[in-house]
Image (cartoon, rainbow, N blue to C red):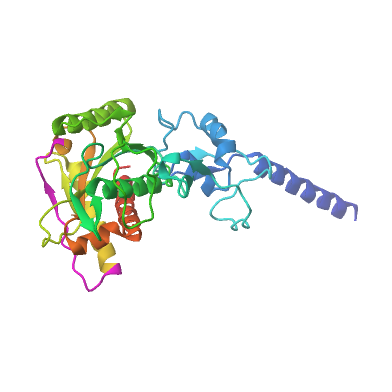
Amino acid sequence: MKNLVQKSILIILLLLTFSVQSQTKNLIVTARKGDGIYSLLRKHGLNPSKYYNAFIKLNKKSIGKKNQLFAGRKYKLPIDKSSKKTTTKNTKKPKKTNKKKTIMTYEIFGKKHKDVELVDNKLEGAVYYLVSGHGGPDPGAIDKINGKLISEDEYAYDVTLRLARQLIQHGATVYLIVKDKNDGIRDKTLLSLDKDEVVHPNLKIPLHHGKRLKQRANAVNKLYKKNKPKYQRLIVLHVDSRSKNQNIDVFFYHYKGSKTGKSLATTLRNTFKKNYKKHQPKRSYEGTVSTRNLYMVNNTYPSMVYIELGNIRNARDRKRIINPENREAMAKWIKEGILIDFDKFN
């Protein structure tokens, strides 16, 4: 009997020892393609804002200069002090809790859309420069609907804002090169014209066409130098202007000598084609990828794509452009292609 009791006590002590050791040992996980510190911590049930610095301290020899993670490399997770344990994919999924969402506020998106929730960190470490066409003293192409003037620059800018917001939701750093402090994202069909747009950081847009383009290219190139060696892309958004009879699909230009620019343009085109097939199966998609001798294509440093969203003078194209739901959809499809491109080169 005495031996049985001793054995039982020994087993209990061993179990207690194992429990304490398992609770105090750092779990080691492998980073996957696209993982950042925030997404890796969140994936394993750890609060990124609470454990970010602890993670860096534990793994300082295994992370990059900009605190980026490397796919396939192993990392130690901080110990969750609240529960004394960490969770892995092999454990049961934790019950849903009322964890605080990460909400960021950007007044540039307007009153209704200024609060942006961080969905994930799929684009952590990526930098995007978004340039909407025309603006300031140059409205671009102008047309009339029911006697009211509409202009190319207002619709290109609205899609640009929507795209910026969606990229931020995935953890990207976004620079709006052309911006209007009071327009915001507008859920209207007819967008009023104004001339108060400025160029980053807060430069008045010149009247001279050549000076306008040079101003934008300079703004992008200065930021590009500042943000090296990060993954960087430039997206230029325009609404085309052709004859009223010419209906066009969304199409893409890239710099002739850029393989990464061509890859981005092709990925975006394929994303649009896939979405057209899904949402409009009876309609063919004829968007193209090509090179073109344009100032913003030839004189900017980042890999880039120049997107024409449609012909503002064509009645069929206008339906795509003036409907706010369509503008949101176009921004979403561009974002989907951008996510694919980021995964491809990281």
Q: Residue at x 29, y 68 (%)?
A: 278
Please, is residue 282 above or below residue 292 in the view? below
Please, is residue 41 above or below residue 145 in the view? above
- Left or right placement of residue 217 versus residue 188 in this view: left
Quick one: 77 or 65, which is closer to the camera? Answer: 65
Q: Position of residue 28 (x, y in %)?
A: 53, 42
Write down the quadrant of residue 85 in the picture: top right
Query: In terms of secondary structure, what is the magenta stretch mainly?
Result: loop
Looking at the rendered image, the quarter that the N terminus falls into is bottom right
- Left or right placement of residue 228 versus residue 48 in this view: left
Q: Residue at x 16, y 38 (%)?
A: 297
Looking at the rendered image, the quarter that the C terminus falls into is top left
Q: Position of residue 254 (x, y in %)?
A: 16, 44
The magenta span reads 279-295
Q: Is residue 200 magenta?
A: no
Q: Position of residue 102 (x, y in %)?
A: 53, 44
- Left or right placement of residue 209 versus residue 93 in this view: left
What is the residue that sits farthest to the bottom in this orientation? 282
Residue 33 in sight here: no
Q: Residue at x 25, y 45 (%)?
A: 153
Q: Position of residue 89 (x, y in %)?
A: 53, 54
- Left or right placement of residue 303 versus residue 43 in this view: left
Quick one: 298 or 66, which is closer to the camera? Answer: 298
